């Protein structure tokens, strides 16, 4: 479904360069797939362009609930925001894959998966690691796996998550 949406909206399967701005994100969010994902995440998630190359932790995108931003550790939430940094923009297709990953986090929070990970391990780092594994799996199910030779995104991120879970 998303590949069709990308083809219809952007042509060439969405492989054209995505301009690094809010307009690109707005165009992606109008696609049927992202409207559906936003609804599944509670319908209140904003997607914002951040005019910076990287976040503090080196990520190209992040999801955070409004509650977390004022200091709470975890809850089921339907009021979050996704920040997409300049470094997340290459093609529309790759930016869409990163956005799907972040919606995996949003859905995890909305459905209290993250809260359950925290309750299970009573450990913030392991809960974060479980949430990363969930988001990568979510992304894979949509056909946007970055598990491929030369990937700068999937292999290091998933490996860090698995390492946290086994320590």
Image (cartoon, rainbow, N blue to C red):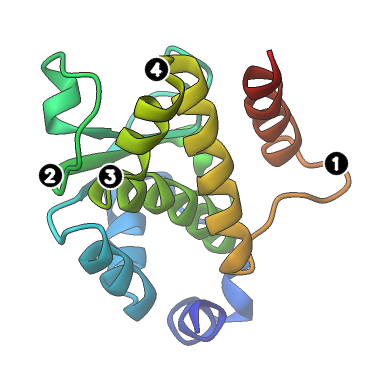
- Marker disc for residue 122: 4
The nearer-to-camera label among 1 and 2 is: 2
Q: Is residue 101 visible?
A: yes
Q: Is residue 17 visible?
A: no
At mark 1, the secondary structure is: loop
Q: Position of residue 105 (x, y in %)?
A: 39, 44
Residue at 36% x, 57% y is: 24
At mark 3, the secondary structure is: loop
At mark 2, the secondary structure is: loop
The nearer-to-camera label among 3 and 4 is: 4
Residue at 39% x, 17% y is: 122
Mark 3 or 4, nearer chain start: 3
- Marker disc for residue 79: 2
Mark 1 or 4, nearer chain start: 4
Query: 6 or 119, which lies in front?
Result: 119
Label 2, label 3: how many angstroms apart (C-alpha)? Answer: 13 Å
Residue at 49% x, 77% y is: 2
Q: Is residue 118 left or right of residue 112?
A: right
At mark 4, the secondary structure is: loop
């Amino acid at each position: 479904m998303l590949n069709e949406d990308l083809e219809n909206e952007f042509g060439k399967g969405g492989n054209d360069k995505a301009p690094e701005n809010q307009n690109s994100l707005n165009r992606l969010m109008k696609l049927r797939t992202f409207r559906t994902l936003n609804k599944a995440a509670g319908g209140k998630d904003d997607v914002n362009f951040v005019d910076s190359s990287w976040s503090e932790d080196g990520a190209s995108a992040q999801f955070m609930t409004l509650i977390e931003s004022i200091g709470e550790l975890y809850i089921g939430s339907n009021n979050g925001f996704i920040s997409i940094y300049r470094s997340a923009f290459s093609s529309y297709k790759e930016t869409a894959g990163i956005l799907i990953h972040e919606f995996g986090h949003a859905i995890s929070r909305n459905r209290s998966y993250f809260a359950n990970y925290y309750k299970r391990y009573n450990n913030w780092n392991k809960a974060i690691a479980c949430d990363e594994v969930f988001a990568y799996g979510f992304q894979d199910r949509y056909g946007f796996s970055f598990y491929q030779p030369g990937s700068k995104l999937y292999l290091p991120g998933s490996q860090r998550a698995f390492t946290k879970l086994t320590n």
